Amino acid sequence: MIKVFRIKGEIVDKDEPMVFTKEYRALKEEDALELLYSEIGSKHGVRRRMIKVHEVEEISEDEITDPILKKMIAMY
C-alpha cells in the first residue's frame, strides 16, 4: 500500500541553510528519500551530501499539507 511521508531537513550548501519540509507518496521510506534527493538536486543544483535530512515520518491523509498531493489522493 502506498504511504505518505513528510521529510524535514535543510540544504547546507549555501551561505545560510535552507530549511525545507516536503511530502511524498511512496511505498517505503527509502523511496521517499530518493524522490527528495532527486527533486532538490534537480531544482536547486545541489549534491546529495549537501542535503541533511532531520526527520522522516509517515503521516495520514488528514495530515497532508501539500495541496497538489491532497488533490492526487482525492482522485483515488
Image: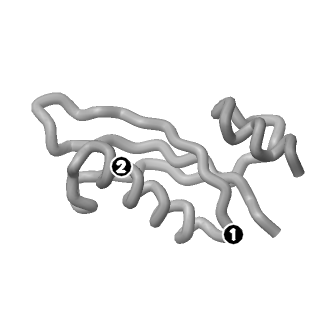
Residue 63: give x, y in percent of width and height.
75, 36
| Secondary structure of the residue carrying numbered label 2 | helix
- Circles 2 and 1, Cβ within 8 Å, touching? The answer is no
The disc label shown at residue 55, or none: none
Rendered residue at 66%/36% (across/down):
68
Rendered residue at 29%/33% (across/down):
18
Residue 65 vertical placement versus 74 (above, below): above
Q: Can you name the residue that lies furthest to the left here?
A: 15
Between 39 and 51, the one lying in front of the other is: 39
Does 31 sit left or right of 68 as displayed?
A: left
Residue 14: give x, y in percent of width and height.
14, 37
Rendered residue at 48%/60% (across/down):
35
* Residue type, numbered disc 2: Ile
Residue 7: give x, y in percent of width and height.
52, 48
Residue denoted by label 1: 27
Rendered residue at 83%/36% (across/down):
62
* Mark 1 nearby-residue class (10 Å; few <14, some 14–19, many ≥20): few
Color theme of the render? one colour
**In terms of image quadrants, where is residue 66?**
top right
Does 13 sit left or right of 66 as displayed?
A: left
Between 28 and 73, the one lying in front of the other is: 73
Q: Can you name the residue that lies furthest to the front here?
A: 75
**In terms of image quadrants, where is residue 48?**
bottom left
Q: Quadrant of the N terminus?
A: bottom right
Between 41 and 4, the one lying in front of the other is: 41
* Mark 2 nearby-residue class (10 Å; few <14, some 14–19, many ≥20): some
* Residue type, numbered disc 1: Leu
Residue denoted by label 2: 40
> Which mark sits nearer the N-terminus, 2 or 1?
1
